Amino acid sequence: MDAVEATKLLAHAAAFDNRKPSKAASIAWAEALKDVPADADAFGAVARFYSKPSQDGDLDGTRWIQPHHVRQLRRQIRDDRIPDGAFTYPLPTGSETGAQFIDRRRQQIAAIADGRIEADPIRQLKGGPHPSVADALAGVGCMPDHVREALADALPGRRAREEGRLRGDADALAVPCPWCHADTNNACKRRRGARGDRPGTWFHRTSPHPGRVDAAAIAARPCPGCQAPMGVPCASSDGRFYDGVHPARQTTRPAA
Ligand SMILES: [Zn+2]
Ligand SMILES: [Zn+2]
């Protein structure tokens, strides 16, 4: 907002707190809020500030709105329009890249925050495939369990891989490890005894690094939580990449 708009916003605040208009205040507010538009939500932020009871830090219950309150409450107003749960994004159009998808998702989130469109919550799909189909699918490419168990004890990292498979996790060893740089199909590694010039000795870890588990989930499937397509990292509702993956993406098993 510029100084003219800040003057209007301050006049709006004055209706609540009887502050005196001043050119210096308008300039200071415009400077502090130069990246915040003077839209209905900015005015709404003032109303929201004065509709709340006093909190610690207010002198004797005297409320006095500051630019940072406008910034914070305007964001809150906009965030309130974005639903907590997952919501749908427009379907990918033809040959859309991951970056284009993320860009489109940001625009959609901004439109929901503006109140220009309404979020369309994802409806839970009920039921699954027919039991006979599920049974047939479960048997595809399966090694008998006693063979898997025997192998699990023989090779490092194999047990964790098998346990992950039984949980419905994506196969962590199907991708290289971004943390220790273990190759695909090789167990994660750690080094012991490295000091100064001594290179130490590498050992196989029995379980994959957590970052590799996330990387495998990202590579293996789209996210039911944030709708990130296969191969694209999870993002939070403000469009920023998420550290790790949403729990729903970690396993193909529905939550009990
Ligand atoms: Zn690793
Ligand atoms: Zn996600």
Image: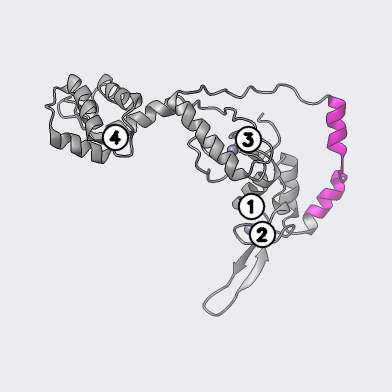
> Going 72% across and 56% down the picture, which residue do you hit?
157
- Give yes or no for residue 208 being in the magenta stretch: no
Q: In this picture, is 164 found above or below 181?
A: above
For mark 2, give the secondary structure: loop
Which quadrant of the figure shows ligand 1? bottom right
Mark 2 and mark 1 lie on one chain; the one further toward the N terminus is 2
x then y, percent, for residue 247:
60, 37
**Residue 123 as seen in the image, left or right of residue 117:** right
- Give the crowd class for mark 1: few <14, some 14-19, many >=20 residues within 10 Å: many
- Give me the C-alpha separation between circle 3 and circle 1: 17 Å
**Residue at (65%, 39%) from the top-left corner?**
229
Q: Quadrant of the N terminus?
A: top left
Residue extending farthest to the front is: 4
Q: Which residue is mark 1?
A: 212
Instruction: Measuring from the top left, give residue 146's x and y in whole percent.
Output: 86, 47
Mark 2 or mark 1: which is in front? Answer: 1
Q: Identity of the amino acid at label 2? A: Cys
Mark 4 Cα-neighbour bin, 10 Å: few <14, some 14–19, many ≥20: some
Query: Quick check: 142 above or below 42?
Result: below
What residue type is disc 4 on? Met
State the residue in front, 209 or 17: 17
The alpha-carbon separation of the residues under discs 4 and 2 comes to 52 Å
Please name which of the two marks, 4 or 3, marks the residue nearer to the observer. Answer: 4
SS for callout 3: helix
Q: Dot 2 corresponds to which residue?
A: 188
Q: Earlier in the sequence, mark 4 or mark 1?
A: 4
